[in-house]
Image (tube, rainbow, N blue to C red):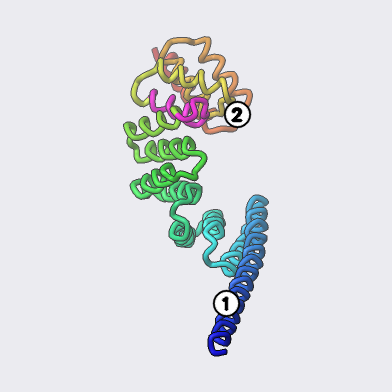
Amino acid sequence: MVLRAAIMIALIFTLFACATVEEKEREDRALFRIADTNLRLGLGYLQQGREEAALQKLQKAVDTMPEYAEAHSSLALAYIHMDQPDKAEEHYQRAVELKPDDGSIQNNYAVFLCGQGQYAKAEQHFLTAIESRRYRTPAEAFENLGVCMLQVPDLEKAETYLRKALQIAPRLPGALLQMARVSVEKKRTMSARAYLQRYQEVATLGPDGLWLGIQVETELGDMAAVKEYKTLLRKNYSDSNEMRMLLETEARERDGASGQ
């Protein structure tokens, strides 16, 4: 009888423990649903430009589930939009602490750090993102890292990382355009032309790319190509900074010609 009673007591404790675990799991699932709903609403508000509403929802997501790394990362994004970098960094740091192997969070944090001029720290987090086995877009991270290194500026590192991006994704538009820029800086004008041509196979040149094309073709002496780039810039981006630079350049050229 004693043995049977002991078995019954053990069984009761086991059933009680299972019930407690199941109840805890139900509570966790309910909290996650609430946090995730607020996260999605917050990101939606952020896309609409409603920063205060976004901040409220994203903060509620974090309050509901403090261990939800994506909520911290999204809250950091809201603080960036509201020009509060200190709070943004605080939540990015918490996000990477909670989920250090999440490549997307690492990449987003690295982009933020680069924007803050913390280039060495940004490089570390970009590389962590790239090394993450579950990160699906390493080419974009290499591209971001290359762009970040251009801001240092460190042309050698920028070229290395941009080449790695193109090894993974040869038609990645941003990396192609940035490699054209690196080539111009390194006086490799023919290479710059080739990258611009490859870029135009996959995307349409914006004002920065058209201005770069003007510089490249002017250096190479192809005035027909220069004229074509100028025409596109005037037609499509008449209010851009690049258009202003073109007008200033042409004014100097006219002044120089009239002074001869």
- Above/below status of 213 relative to 89: above
Work out which quarter of the rendered image holds the C terminus and state it: top left
Looking at the picture, tell me which residue is in the foreground, 177 or 223: 177
The residue shown at (65%, 52%) is 49
Residue that carries the numbered disc 1 in the rendered image: 14
Q: Can residue 247 be seen in this view?
A: no
Q: Residue 200 carries which label?
A: none
Per the picture, the main secondary structure of the magenta-coloured stretch is helix
The label nearer to you, 2 versus 1, is 1
Label 1, secondary structure: give it.
helix
Q: Which amino acid does label 1 sit on?
A: Thr
Q: What residue type is labelled 2?
A: Tyr
- Above/below status of 136 relative to 58: above
x, y percent for residue 79: 53, 58
Looking at the picture, tell me which residue is in the foreground, 116 or 124: 124
The residue shown at (45%, 56%) is 96
Work out which quarter of the rendered image holds the N terminus and state it: bottom right
x, y percent for residue 28: 61, 68
Classify mark 1: residues with Cα within 10 Å, few (<14), some (14-19) or many (20+). Answer: few
Quick check: 120 left or right of 241? Answer: left
Residue that carries the numbered disc 2 in the rendered image: 237
